[in-house]
Image (cartoon, rainbow, N blue to C red):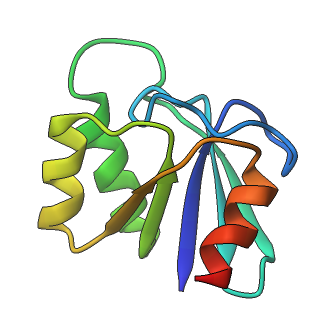
Amino acid sequence: MKIAIASVGKKEDSDVSSRGGRAPYYLIFDEKKTLLDTVSNPFAVGGGGAGTAVAKMLADMDVNVVILGKIGEKMLSSLSEKGIKYHEEDGSVNVVLNNFLKN
């Protein structure tokens, strides 16, 4: 399983980003809490459609679950179409990841 967490920074102690499509980074973990990749979001700045583009990017990376502060309607629809689950959470990336994996 691959878990993508929207983050305001590149490190595991960074806060979860409240903006899914415009999150500066996505940290990709496996179910063992291993950080697999840190992705700078190329859609963080620019025109519309960021949520849809991020959903496609994450699907192309074989992500199964996305954790973010808040999800927009377009991103929600795109994730659903691709079979990717999501959870809205606040806090630091490492705490949110630990809580998610406990449940």
The one nearer the camera, 70 or 3, is 70
Q: Say which residue appears at 55% left-offset and 60% top-offset.
A: 4
Question: Percent from the top left, x then y, of residue 86?
Answer: 37, 61
Residue found 84% across the figure and 51% down from its top: 12
The one nearer the camera, 97 or 63, is 97
* Total numbered badges shown on the rendered structure: 0
Quadrant including the C terminus: bottom right
In front: 103, or 11? 103
Q: Image height check: is 1 above or below 45?
A: below
Above/below status of 31 relative to 9: below
Side of 58 relative to 92 (left or right) = left
Query: Where residue 73 sits in the image (x, y, percent)?
Result: 16, 37
Which residue is situated farthest in the top direction here? 46
Tell me if 17 is positioned left or right of 96 in this view. left
Q: Picture coordinates of residue 3 (x, y %)? A: 56, 70
Q: Hey, which quadrant is residue 35 in on the image?
A: bottom right
Residue that appears at 29% across and 41% down: 53
**Side (left or right) of 34 relative to 59:** right
Residue drawn at (51%, 30%) of the image: 18
Residue 24 rendering spot, x and y as whole percentages: 60, 29
Quick check: 25 above or below 87?
A: above
